[in-house]
Image: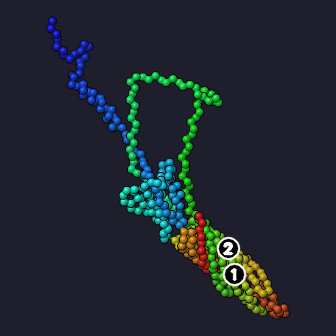
């Protein structure tokens, strides 16, 4: 009995694959997971370069601590990106310039040439400070770094039985079968509030009067001030020292009289709101005080009210000090004065003076002084 040659058909009647296709199918099956892994998405994560800050403040602007807070407000979760031991340097400089402020940022890599300087200028420190802080937050960032997602675990070949439940570990004060709620996640810290550009100052000055008494008279003053970058308001105490004055106006209805010589001084309180532009200052003045008359035979006082404009200048010469000068004109809506109705001193039977002195409608005041600013 002769044997039949194998024709590639098995006992079940199914056709077997040719022997040469078996290695090809195995190779394709092994390459499929690799291609699936290559097709997985890649996530880009923002990176921060460790950077050391070199900070130089300007008179009347913010300090280094405020700059750390300002840059952190632009970063993820409000974190401070600066490291005092980092090799990369970010040099930040603020300068007081004519008409405002200038901020400069320069990045200095650990190895390589320094970057060109980048700057912002503006009238107020607040605006320049905000722009420089935003620019610094960009200069501490590096190129995004790719992060590959983790590989999916291979499916188990054999089923794994579920683990046995652990022994009860419920505390004595908690019924079994209940669980405590997870602790709340604390909210990220809020960035600090933006500091207001306000300062408190103390001013002192000497001055002279014009058209207030018969002669040019001396005066001194001291003031406390609260100011911003443009507007401010001050309260001043002023004392015009005694100056020679003459009463020459005849009292209405008197038939005769003679001039009376006396010393005139003034004590007053002033409220002065001002606006500043570069080195120039413009103000309004409101004054309430007392006129004091002293002659050889009497001493008297009377109310004094005045309003008017003030123009001046202010030039800083140190971080907290400045020299200033001003001139003002005060108008008196109430022409208060003093009446003299007595005989000459030492002559009780002499003629009656019958003269009076009235406060001038307008008086001039010119002063120079020094101011010191406290933040």
Q: Residue drawn at (77%, 91%), measured in percent from left and top? A: 257
Q: In which quarter of the image is the N terminus?
A: top left
- Judge whether 134 appears above or below 269 on screen: above
Query: Left of 229 or right of it: where is 155?
Result: left
- Residue for badge 1: 241
- The location of residue 305, given as percent across then percent down, is 69, 76
> In the picture, residue 13 is in which quadrant?
top left
Position of 14 with respect to 146 (left or right) is left
Q: Can residue 286 be seen in this view?
A: no
- Residue at the left extreme? 2
Query: Callout 2: few (<14), some (14-19), or many (20+) C-alpha neighbours within 10 Å?
Result: some
Is 45 above or below relative to 264?
Answer: above
Residue in the foreground of this view, choosing between 267 and 176: 176
Work out which residue is located at the far top of the displayed protein and give it: 1
The residue labelled by disc 2 is 237
Residue nearer the viewer, 251 or 215: 215
> What is the residue that sits farthest to the front in this orientation?
85
Where residue 286 appears, as percent x and y from the top left, is: 65, 73
Label 1 – label 2 distance at C-alpha: 13 Å
For the point 74% across and 80% down, which residue is it? 292
Point 22% across, 16% down: residue = 9
User: Where is 75 relative to 344, above or below?
Assistant: above
What SS does tag 2 mark?
strand
Q: Where is residue 282 in the image (x, y as percent from the top left)?
A: 57, 73
Q: Observer-nearest residue: 354 or 136?
A: 136
**Residue 76 in the image, given as x and y percentages of width and height:** 48, 49
Q: Which residue is drawn at 42% across and 48% down?
A: 46
Q: Is residue 44 visible in this depiction of the protein?
A: yes
- Identify the image quadrant of the C terminus: bottom right
Give the quarter of the image for residue 151.
Answer: top left
| Circle 1 Cα neighbour tier, 10 Å, few/some/many (<14 / 14–19 / ≥20) | some
Q: Tag on residue 102?
A: none
């Amino acid at each position: 009995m002769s044997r039949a040659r194998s024709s590639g058909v098995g006992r079940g009647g199914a056709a077997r694959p040719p022997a040469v296709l078996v290695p090809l199918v195995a190779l394709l099956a092994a390459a499929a997971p690799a291609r699936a892994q290559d097709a997985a998405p890649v996530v880009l994560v923002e990176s921060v370069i460790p950077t050391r800050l070199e900070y130089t403040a300007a008179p009347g602007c913010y300090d280094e601590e405020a700059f750390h807070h300002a840059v952190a407000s632009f970063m993820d979760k409000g974190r401070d990106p600066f490291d005092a031991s980092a090799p990369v340097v970010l040099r930040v400089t603020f300068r007081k310039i004519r008409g405002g402020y200038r901020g400069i940022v320069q990045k200095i890599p650990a190895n390589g040439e320094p970057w060109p300087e980048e700057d912002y200028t503006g009238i107020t420190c607040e605006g320049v400070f905000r722009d420089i802080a935003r620019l610094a937050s960009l200069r501490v960032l590096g190129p995004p770094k790719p992060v590959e997602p983790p590989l999916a675990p291979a499916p188990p070949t054999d089923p794994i039985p579920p683990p046995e439940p652990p022994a009860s570990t419920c505390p004595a004060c908690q019924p079994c079968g209940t669980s405590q709620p997870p602790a709340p996640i604390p909210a990220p810290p809020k960035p600090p509030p933006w500091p207001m550009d306000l300062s408190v100052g103390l001013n002192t000055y000497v001055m002279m009067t014009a058209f207030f008494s018969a002669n040019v008279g001396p005066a001194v003053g001291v003031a406390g001030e609260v100011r911003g970058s443009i507007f401010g308001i001050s309260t001043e105490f002023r004392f015009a020292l005694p100056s020679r004055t003459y009463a020459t106006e005849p009292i209405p209805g008197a038939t005769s009289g003679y001039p009376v010589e006396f010393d005139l001084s003034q004590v007053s309180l002033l409220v002065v709101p001002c606006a500043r532009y570069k080195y120039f200052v413009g103000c309004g003045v409101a004054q309430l005080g007392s006129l004091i008359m002293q002659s050889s035979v009497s001493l008297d006082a009377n109310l004094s009210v005045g309003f008017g404009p003030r123009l001046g200048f202010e030039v800083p010469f140190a971080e907290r000090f400045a020299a200033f000068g001003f001139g003002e004109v005060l108008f008196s809506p109430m022409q208060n004065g003093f009446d003299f109705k007595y005989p000459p001193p030492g002559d009780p039977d002499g003629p009656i003076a019958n003269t009076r002195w009235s406060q001038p409608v307008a008086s001039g005041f010119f002063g120079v002084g020094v101011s010191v600013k406290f933040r």
